[in-house]
Image: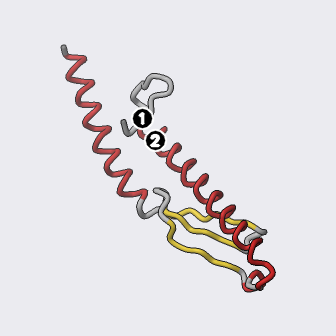
Amino acid sequence: MRDMFGLMKQAQEMQAKMQEMQAELEHIEVEGQAGGGMVRVTLTAKGQMKGLAIDDQLLKADEKVILEDLIVVAHEDARKKSERLLEEKMKSLTGGLALPPGMKLPF
C-alpha cells in the first residue's frame, strides 16, 4: 500500500509540473524559415502563430505562388521545431516515471 501512496504522490507532482510546463510553452517562441530565410514564421511552442516576415524581394505579383509555398514551408518548419521542443520537455518531465511504450502525456 505504501507503494500506491508513493505512486499517487509522484503523479500529483508530475501533474503540477505539467501545468507549469504548459504555461511556459505559451511564452517560448520558435522560428521556421524557408527560401534561405526570405520567409520566416514565428510560433509559440504550443503552435500559435505569432509573426510572419517576408523579404521585400518576394513581393512581386509574378512571385505570388512561390511566396505562398514558402509561407507554408516556413510554418511547417516552425511547427516541427515546436514539436521537438515539446518532446524534449516531456522527456525531462517524465524522466523519473516509467511509462509504458507509446503512452503519451497529457492523457
Rendered location of residue 38, percent (x, y): 74, 74
Rendered location of residue 63, percent (x, y): 79, 78
Q: Quadrant of residue 25?
A: bottom left
Residue receiving disc 2 = 90
Residue closer to the observer: 63 or 16:
63
Label 1 close to label 2 by CB (< 8 Å) = yes
Residue at the far right in the pictured view: 62
Rendered location of residue 59, percent (x, y): 73, 84
Tag count: 2
Rendered location of residue 41, percent (x, y): 61, 69
Q: SS of the residue at dot 1?
A: loop
Residue receiving disc 1 = 94
Quadrant containing the N terminus is top left
Q: Quadrant of residue 26?
A: bottom left
Q: Using the image, tell me which numbered label, if any, was put on residue 29.
A: none
Q: Residues within 10 Å of mark 1 (few under 14, many from 20)?
A: some
Q: SS of the residue at dot 2?
A: helix
